[in-house]
Image (spheres, grey):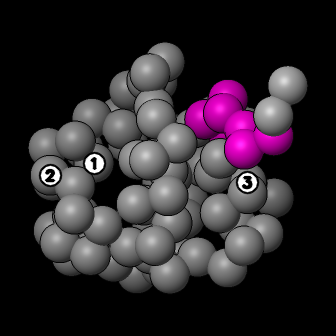
Amino acid sequence: MLPLTFSGTLNALIDCSGMTEEKLAEAASISEKTIQRLRNDEPDNVTIETVVQLSIGMQLPPVLSSCLLKASGKSFMMK
């Protein structure tokens, strides 16, 4: 089971992927500094775009991408 926080979920998924922050930064087109910030803080302004970039960079299956999106507090659902 994944943690409920965004940082916790992101850390678990990165650990499971076996990727380094450097490789993920390259694959996701996000700076390594941003990944470090997302892993170590509880960001309240994570964008859907960032979640998608991280999901693509780690090549997450849809169910895990959905978990990361949910942990970010964002949704693709229209209100």
User: Does 66 appear above or below 24?
Assistant: above
> Which residue is denoted by mark 3 in the rendering?
67
> Which residue is denoted by mark 2 in the rendering?
31
User: Percent from the top left, x then y, of residue 76?
Assistant: 72, 44
Query: How many numbered tags mark residues here?
Result: 3
Question: In the image, which residues are magenta?
Answer: 71-77
Q: Give the class, few, some or many, for how many residues have Cα within 10 Å of label 1's Cα (few <14, many ≥20).
A: many
In the displayed orientation, state which residue is furthest to the right: 79
Q: How far is the residue under mark 3 from the one under mark 2?
A: 22 Å
Left/right of residue 27 with respect to residue 65 in the rendered view = left
Q: Which mark is residue 35?
A: 1
Do the residues under discs 1 and 2 have CB atoms within 8 angstroms?
A: yes
- Residue at 73 percent across and 57 percent down: it is 66
Secondary element at image label 1: helix
Q: Main secondary structure of the magenta part?
A: loop
- Residue at 81 percent across and 40 percent down: it is 77
